Amino acid sequence: MRQILVAGNWKLNGSLDSVKQLVSGIMAGAGDTGDTRIAVCPPFIYIPLAANLLAGSRIALGSQDISDQESGAFTGEVSGPMLKDFGCTYAIVGHSERRALYGEDDEWTARKFAAARRTGLTPILCVGETLQEREQGITEDVVARQLDAVIDLEGIDAIGTAVIAYEPVWAIGTGMTATPDQAQDVHAFIRSKLAGLDQAVADKVQILYGGSVKGSNAAELFAMQDIDGGLIGGASLAADDFLAICNAGG
């Protein structure tokens, strides 16, 4: 049985004091979350602080992004080896905000996925459709295209060493949430698509849901057959809210 993973994406939020308080609060309650795996993804600049605070705990550390390059004249970029130096085990790639706001296309996302794997980081590959694409009935086409870019570059076996996060763009930070059945339908499609290439990979890969997940709806979402946890945005910024979601997976 696949283990539940709850990963907090803090986005562009935080300060020295708030990061200390947030990590302290999560650590204080993490022992009550059963077998749920927990990860936090702070802004790059707070990763060293979070790493020190989390030392010796069961909470994993991840980054919100990663460069597709490992070194060189790439101003402002942060590479996989740098993230590994500070204890990261996960790297989010292809978040809809990176795709929409910064023009990162499927191929660029695939290169970032590859860069994470080269460094020994576990990529959390984000896929998902906009409201317009859902209304056009092309959700599966969009998600398949995003997955195919990675599979074409890295092969199906690489998916088995990663995490997938289905995040319908229309539900991110909007307060709108896909119903458990809507989310399950897309998760089942993803797993079925992967099974057509390699059943073992499809069976083991964790597929998270992200999009206005809260303590009040997490248990129902996580109870779905193909939903293996959540990639959490706003609710990950308050320890009690985040822990309520983690507890839903216990």
Image (cartoon, rainbow, N blue to C red):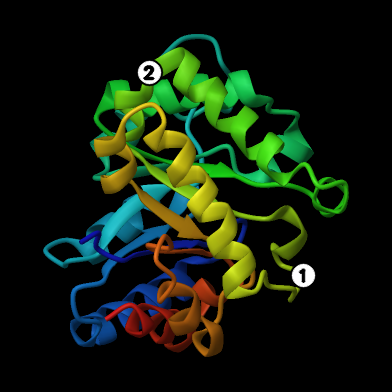
Ranked by sequence position, the earlier of labels 1 and 2 is 2
Q: Residue 64 carries which label?
A: none
Q: x, y (%) of residue 231?
A: 49, 61
**Relative height, residue 39 to residue 29 (above, below):** above
Q: Nearer the viewer, residue 179 or 30?
A: 179
Q: Which of 86 and 194 is in front in this view?
A: 194
Looking at the rendered structure, the kind of residue marked 2 is Gly
Rounded to the nearest angstrom, the CA distance separating label 1 from label 2 is 34 Å
Q: How many labels does the image show?
A: 2
Point 16% across, 67% down: residue: 57
Q: Which mark is residue 174?
A: 1
Q: Mark 2 points at which residue?
A: 155
Q: Which of 39 and 87 is in front in this view?
A: 39
- Can residue 210 be seen in the rendering of this structure? no
At mark 1, the secondary structure is loop
Asked if the residue at tag 2 contacts the one at tag 1, i.e. Cβ–Cβ closer than 8 Å, the answer is no
Point 58% across, 37% down: residue: 94
Image quarter of residue 183: bottom right
Q: x, y (%) of residue 52?
A: 24, 59
Image quarter of residue 6: bottom left
